[in-house]
Image (tube, grey):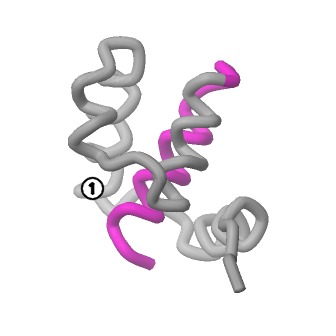
């Protein structure tokens, strides 16, 4: 899994807040960048935690894959 997908997954799971979950899905689909999310004060703390967990390799790749399969939009 790539870094952005993993961060999107961790961000999605970090909160029950619908806005944060929506931003995580937008990140997964490339509608918003990590840099843009870092400017959003309401998401900043969650993003820092997600990046920290990723660096510590505290992530289940199978769950990330299931998250991506569920929420990734594929355009044909």
Q: x, y (%) of residue 52?
A: 26, 44
Q: Residue at x 49, y 40 (%)?
A: 11
Q: Residue at x 60, y 26 (%)?
A: 15
Magenta stretch, residue numbers: 1-18
Say whether residue 3 is magenta. yes
Reading the image, the residue beneath label 1 is 56
Q: x, y (%) of residue 47?
A: 34, 34
* Looking at the image, residue 64 lies above or below residue 26: below
Q: Residue at x 45, y 59 (%)?
A: 30
* Foreground of the two, 71 or 3: 71
* Looking at the image, residue 34 lies above or below residue 22: below
* Looking at the image, residue 26 lies above or below residue 56: above
Q: Which corner quadrant of the image does residue 14 belong to?
A: top right
Instruction: Give the quarter of the figure containing the N terminus.
Output: bottom left
Instruction: Give the quarter of the figure containing the C terminus.
Output: bottom right
For label 1, the SS is loop
Residue extending furthest toward the bottom: 76
Q: Residue at x 72, y 70 (%)?
A: 66
> Could you tell me what secondary structure mostly forms the magenta stretch?
helix
Residue extending furthest toward the right: 70
Q: x, y (%) of residue 48?
A: 27, 33
Q: How many marks?
A: 1
Q: x, y (%) of residue 36?
A: 27, 37
């Amino acid at each position: 899994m790539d870094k952005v997908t993993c961060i999107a997954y961790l961000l999605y799971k970090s909160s029950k807040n619908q806005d944060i979950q929506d931003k995580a899905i937008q990140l997964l689909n490339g509608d918003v960048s990590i840099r843009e999310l870092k400017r959003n004060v309401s998401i900043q703390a969650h993003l820092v935690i997600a990046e920290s967990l990723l660096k510590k390799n505290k992530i289940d790749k199978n769950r990330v894959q299931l998250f991506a399969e569920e929420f990734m939009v594929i355009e044909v």
